[in-house]
Image: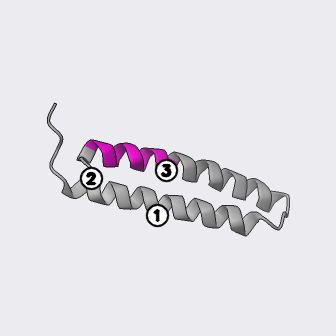
Amino acid sequence: MDRDKHIKLADQAITRAERLAGRAESAAINELPVTAIWAAAAGAWSDIARTHAAIAGVLPQTED
């Protein structure tokens, strides 16, 4: 997998993490018992985004 692919996957993962964090925030505001589940899922997707970004950071730039 090349650098651009990892950047794209990082972007997709952080978008998903943002959506899940929004659900966690909404659940927390409404004092729902699923808050921790949404927050854990957001954290997992954030980890995935960081991993792809770190891999992209050490790969050579993709040539066009």
Mark 2 element type = helix
Magenta segment range?
Answer: 4-14
Q: Residues within 10 Å of mark 3 (few under 14, many from 20)?
A: some
Q: Of the numbered discs in the image, which one, if any, rests on residue 56?
A: 2
Q: Residue furthest front?
A: 1
Q: Residue sitting at 48 percent across and 50 percent down?
A: 13
Q: Which residue is mark 1?
A: 47
Taking the magenta stretch, the answer to whether it contains residue 5 is yes
Q: Earlier in the sequence, mark 1 or mark 3?
A: 3
Residue 10 image offset from top left, x and y in percent:
40, 50
Q: Which residue is mark 3?
A: 14
Q: Are marks 1 and 3 in contact (CB under 8 Å)?
A: no
Above or below, 1 against 55 in this view is above
Residue 23 image offset from top left, x and y in percent:
71, 53
Q: Residue sitting at 43 percent across and 56 percent down?
A: 49
Q: Earlier in the sequence, mark 2 or mark 1?
A: 1
Number of marks in picture = 3
Above or below, 44 against 62 in this view is below
Q: Amino acid at mark 2?
A: Ala
Pick the residue in front: 12 or 26.
Answer: 12
